[in-house]
Amino acid sequence: MTLDEYRRFYAEEIEQVATLSSPALVEAFARVPREKFLGPPPWQFASAEARAMAAVGLTQAAYRTTSEPRHLYHNVVVSVDRAKDINNGQPSALAAWINALDLKSGDRVYHMGCGVGYYTAIMAELVGPGGSVVALDAQPDLAARARENLSGYPQTAVHTGDGAAFDPEPCDAMLVNAGVTHPHALWLERLREGGRLVMPLTLAISPTIGQGVMVKIVRGASGFSASVVTPLAILNGGSLRDPELEAPLRQALMKAMSTGAIFKLKSLRRDAHEPDESCLWHTPGACLSTNPIISEDIWT
Ligand SMILES: [Zn+2]
C-alpha cells in the first residue's frame, strides 16, 4: 500500500469510529498529510487512553517510537512536546468535534489552541479558499510551527497569544482545544447568528489534564441552544480556567454526569436568574440549562 492508500483507509476508519456525517470531512482526512505537521521523525505515539492514564499517574506513558509515516495513520495521539504533555490529539475525537461544527464552504472559523496546525488544516479544507480560519496558540514555538505548516493554506492566519484575551472577531464556528471552566463572554458575543461553538467543559484531574464533556453551543435568533457532543479528556486551558469556579464546577459536573442530567442540556442562558433545578452549571455570566431557549426579549 502507498502512503496515500494508508491515509484513505485511516480516513474511512475515522469516519466509522467517529460516526462522521460530513463526506467533505472524510475527504479532508484522506488528503491532509499528518506527517508533514509533526516535524522530522522519529515520532512518539500512543493510544489516547494510555496517555490520559499516564497523565494522572496510573500507568507509565505507553509511547512507542516510529519513523514510519504510515504508523501515524491510526487512531493515536502523537507527542508534540513531552515535557508539557502536548500531543497532536486523537483523530476520532477531533473528527467528532469538527463534525459537530457543521463547517460550510466560506465559513469563518476560530481554532483556539491550534498546536502544530494539523486539525486547522482539516478545517481549512472544509471552509475552502473562500473561507478563513483564525488560529491561536499560547505557545510561540507551536504557533510558529503551525504558521509554517499552514503556509500552503492562504485562508489561515496563525496568532500567538492568550486565549482569555484574544478577540477572534465575528465567526461562524469556533473550536476550543483546551479544557475550560465556562464559556467566555467574548466567544459568545463573537458568534454570528447560526454560529456554532464547540468547547470542552472539564474538571482538572491533574496539573495538565482535565476530564469532562465537549459542549456544543449554537447561537439562534432568540438565544443559545446547547448540547453534549462527547465525553473527553483534554489539556487544561491555563488562563481560560477561573480558579474560583473550579470547586463549584467540580460539584456541578460530578452531579450532572453521575445522574445523566448532563445529557438533558438544552440551552445556554445569559439572563440574570436565581439558580434552580434546571441549572446544570450556573455562573453569573453563563448558565448551562436543561430549559429550552429563553426568548431574547426576556434576557436583553
Ligand atoms: Zn442557572
Image (cartoon, grey):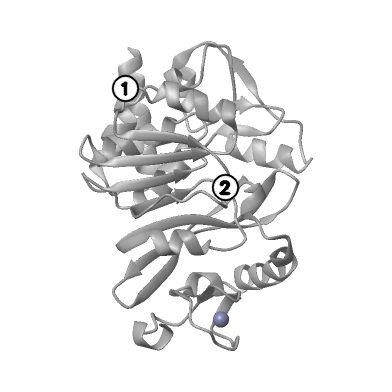
Q: Is residue 253 left or right of residue 113?
A: right
- Residue located beneath label 1 in the image: 152
Q: Is residue 104 left or right of residue 257?
A: left
Q: Is mark 1 within 8 Å of ligand 1?
A: no
Q: Secondary structure at mark 2?
A: loop
Residue 113 at x, y percent in the picture: 52, 41
Measuring 49% from the left and 40% from the top, which residue is drawn there? 136
Residue 39 at x, y percent in the picture: 51, 16
Q: Is residue 148 left or right of residue 247?
A: left
Q: Please tell me which residue lies in front, 258 or 82.
A: 82
For the N terminus, give its image quadrant. top left
Q: Secondary structure at mark 1?
A: loop
Q: Is residue 78 visible?
A: no
Tell me the mark number nearer the camera, choosing from 1 and 2: 1
The 10 Å Cα crowd at callout 1, few under 14, some 14 to 19, many 20 or more, is few
The relative height of residue 236 versus residue 59 in the rendered view (above or below) is: below
- Residue located beneath label 2 in the image: 178
Q: Is residue 72 visible?
A: yes
Measuring 58% from the left and 12% from the top, which residue is drawn there? 42
Q: Is residue 168 left or right of residue 172?
A: right
Q: Please tell me which residue lies in front, 125 or 150.
A: 150
The quarter holding residue 47 reads: top right
- Quadrant containing ligand 1: bottom right
- What amino acid type should be assigned to the residue bearing mark 1? Gly
The relative height of residue 277 versus residue 144 in the rendered view (above or below) is: below
Residue 209 at x, y percent in the picture: 68, 46
Residue 224 at x, y percent in the picture: 39, 72
For the C terminus, give its image quadrant. bottom left
